């Protein structure tokens, strides 16, 4: 039944590829994967295999990949993706030796895959459990580690109709889960090979913070100002913070308030809509900024990718977008700098955001009125601000270290010299 579903999926992707760019990338990428493996995998080399569904899972696995790379240079890294949103962004990442799509999980594909490469171990990031690949690993004696995984009662493994598929979990050597609930759920299926380590994403945001790029133009823009950073914003987010900024930017003559917007989508239509909403403001796009013009601007729009994680450190307060539609984006990426974060209400499935809300480091907003109330309080009440900032720093620090625990478990000989 499982293999039949995979073949149906292959057919659906092939048909969709005629009309849809994403499906086309997926179909072509899967076909090319075996050619890449044949050409790039070197005989006699030792490979560690990491599989990430998409870009978010890649970021969770990255601290561990970099640790293996740094402390075991004799090992090569094979990185596979399922989704184009992961592969197309990271296909040239220098941290892996071979990067390709994971061929779909059919018996024939699995046999061909292991013909080209026999990894020493497999790390599955978060959710991916491909039945035929895991059977192949088990048959070849390849240990499988599930990293940063989360299990919930509504998943197929814990439903009556998932009895057949849950056997795939028997092929996992060890589960490194994010929370105690996941450990308890696995225990109901008889799995005790479980360690609660938290989320490797915290290690990643700390790495990003420690390697944050110097941005001279942003530093010049933010000089002597209180800065509100809107990260990965969508129009519903902008409908809250833009009116607030327009009302507050000249409210205190002795205090300079500045706004940085890094929209999730940087198409021309969206950028122009933001500029039109900021009527009466001196607005500048980062791509057009110079030392002379940036110091005169009141709003800086980041119209390129890759800078947001470094920009948050210039903020006194931040909003992380997506909470009024697609779901919030990366809240720890802002909180790691010890700044309070505002988010929209669609955050129920985002564990870190929920915890930051509980800790008082993050604040949920629904309307322009409660946005203004919370933002004004944090910008003017020093005690409230310091409490939220301290809670953000403490939460990140308390949850860091998952990659180290995993590494020491998998490579104990490294600890023994």
Image: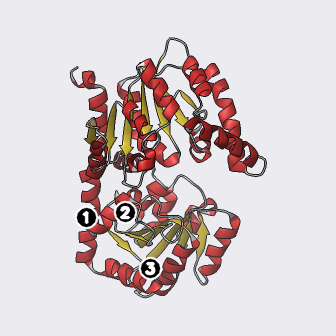
Which residue has dot 1 on it?
391
- Using residue 128 as the reference point, say whether residue 274 is left or right of it: right
Of callouts 3 and 1, the N-terminal one? 3
Q: Quadrant of the C terminus?
A: top left
Q: What residue is shown at x 38% (from left), y 49% (from top)?
A: 158
168 or 278: nearer the eye? 168
- Secondary element at image label 2: helix
Q: CA distance from mark 3 to mark 1?
A: 22 Å
**In x, y percent, where is residue 313?**
39, 60
- Secondary element at image label 1: helix
In the rendered image of this protein, does residue 200 appear above or below residue 230?
above
Of callouts 3 and 2, the N-terminal one? 2
**In x, y percent, where is residue 131?**
49, 34
Colour scheme of the picture: secondary structure
Crowding at dot 2, Cα within 10 Å, few <14 / some 14-19 / many 20+, comes out as many
Q: Tell me the tag on residue 366.
A: 3
Which residue has dot 2 on it?
353
- Secondary element at image label 3: loop
Q: Quadrant of the N terminus?
A: top right
Q: What residue is shown at x 44% (from left), y 45% (from top)?
A: 162
Crowding at dot 1, Cα within 10 Å, few <14 / some 14-19 / many 20+, comes out as many
Q: Residue furthest front?
A: 160
**In x, y percent, where is residue 5?**
60, 41
In the rendered image of this protein, does residue 92 appear above or below residue 113?
below
């Amino acid at each position: 039944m499982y293999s039949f579903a995979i073949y149906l999926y292959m057919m659906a992707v092939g048909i969709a590829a005629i009309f849809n760019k994403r499906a086309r990338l997926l179909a072509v990428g899967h076909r090319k994967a075996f050619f890449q493996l044949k050409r790039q995998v070197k005989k006699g080399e030792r490979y560690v295999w990491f599989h990430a569904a998409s870009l978010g899972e890649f970021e969770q696995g990255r601290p561990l990949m970099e640790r293996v790379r740094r402390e075991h240079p004799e090992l090569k890294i094979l990185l596979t993706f399922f989704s184009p949103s992961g592969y197309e962004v990271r296909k040239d990442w220098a941290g892996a030796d071979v990067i390709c799509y994971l061929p779909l999980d059919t018996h024939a594909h699995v046999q061909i895959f292991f013909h080209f490469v026999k990894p020493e171990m497999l790390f599955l990031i978060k959710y991916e459990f491909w039945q035929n690949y895991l059977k192949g690993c088990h048959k070849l004696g390849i240990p499988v580690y599930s990293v940063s995984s989360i299990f919930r009662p509504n998943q197929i493994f814990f439903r009556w109709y998932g009895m057949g598929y849950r056997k795939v979990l028997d092929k996992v050597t060890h589960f490194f889960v994010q929370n105690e609930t996941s450990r308890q759920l696995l225990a109901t299926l008889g799995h005790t090979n479980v360690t609660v380590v938290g989320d490797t994403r915290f290690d990643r945001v700390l790495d990003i913070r420690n390697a944050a790029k110097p941005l001279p133009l942003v530093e010049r823009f933010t000089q002597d100002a209180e800065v509100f950073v809107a990260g990965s914003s969508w129009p519903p987010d902008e409908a809250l913070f833009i009116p607030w900024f327009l009302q507050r930017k000249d409210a205190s003559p002795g205090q300079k308030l500045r706004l940085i917007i890094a929209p999730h989508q940087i198409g021309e239509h969206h950028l122009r809509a933001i500029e039109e909403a900021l009527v009466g403001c001196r607005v500048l796009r980062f791509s057009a900024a110079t030392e002379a013009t940036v110091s005169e601007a009141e709003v800086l729009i980041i119209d390129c990718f890759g800078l947001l994680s470094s920009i948050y450190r210039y903020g006194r307060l931040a909003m992380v977008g997506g909470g009024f539609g697609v779901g919030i984006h990366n809240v720890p990426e802002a909180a790691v700098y010890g700044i309070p974060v505002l988010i929209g209400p669609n955050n129920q499935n985002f564990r870190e955001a929920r915890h930051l809300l509980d800790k008082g480091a993050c604040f949920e907003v629904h309307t322009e009125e409660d946005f203004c109330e919370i933002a004004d309080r944090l910008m003017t009440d020093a005690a409230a601000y310091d409490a939220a900032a301290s809670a953000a720093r403490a939460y990140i620090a308390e949850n860091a270290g998952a990659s180290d625990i995993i590494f020491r478990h998998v490579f104990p000989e490294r600890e023994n010299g």
